[in-house]
Image (spheres, rainbow, N blue to C red):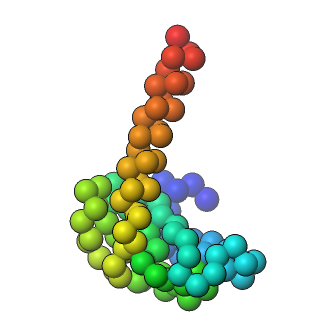
């Protein structure tokens, strides 16, 4: 399903489904691991700190703005802001590399 066509609720449900699948297959245990994605409005949706992938509730997922301010849901992981900044830097570098390759 195209992320741009999905509602925030659908994205929340998708994270819960993915997390549960990872938990059931033994890829994530206890409170280990984080899942997050960038919402169409620029905020980030993420698994809360210390949450079990096997017991996530879509409505309790954390929403954080680009500066790391907690908007709604449970408290986000402290690592979330670091991960989002890393993704932003990586995407910027990849765009630069693609631009150089195409010229």
Q: Left or right: 48 with respect to 52? A: left
From this view, report whether residue 77 is shown above or below residue 93. Answer: below
Q: Position of residue 27 (x, y in %)?
A: 69, 73
Question: Looking at the image, which is closer to me, 79 or 40?
Answer: 79
Please tell me which residue is depicted at 54% across the width and 24% down the height of the picture: 98
Please indicate whether residue 80 sits to the left or right of residue 13 in the image. Answer: left
Tell me what residue is drawn at x 31 percent, y 66 percent. 64
Q: Position of residue 35 (x, y in %)?
A: 52, 67
Quarter of the image where one finds residue 75: bottom left
| Rendered residue at 51%/17% (across/down) | 100
Nearer-the-camera pick, 50 or 7: 50
Q: Quadrant of residue 9?
A: bottom left
Counting every numbered tag in the picture gives: 0
Q: In what quadrant of the picture does the N terminus appear?
A: bottom right
In the rendered image, the vertical position of residue 92 relative to residue 29, given as above or below: above
Residue at 47 percent of width and 39 percent of height: 91
- In the rendered structure, the answer to whether residue 25 lies left or right of residue 95 reads right
On the image, the x and y values in percent for residue 73 come to: 34, 80
Can residue 92 be spotted in the picture?
yes
Residue nearer the viewer, 63 or 90: 90
Q: Residue furthest top?
A: 103
| Residue 21 appears anywhere in the view | no
């Amino acid at each position: 399903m195209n992320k741009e066509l999905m509602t925030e609720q659908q994205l929340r449900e998708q994270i819960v489904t993915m997390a549960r699948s990872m938990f059931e297959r033994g890829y994530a245990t206890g409170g280990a691991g984080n899942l997050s994605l960038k919402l169409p409005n620029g905020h980030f949706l993420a698994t809360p700190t210390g949450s079990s992938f096997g017991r996530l509730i879509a409505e309790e997922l954390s929403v954080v703005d680009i500066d790391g301010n907690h908007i709604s849901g449970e408290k986000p992981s402290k690592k979330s802001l670091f991960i989002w900044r890393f993704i932003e830097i990586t995407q910027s570098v990849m765009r630069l590399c693609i631009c150089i390759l195409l010229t």
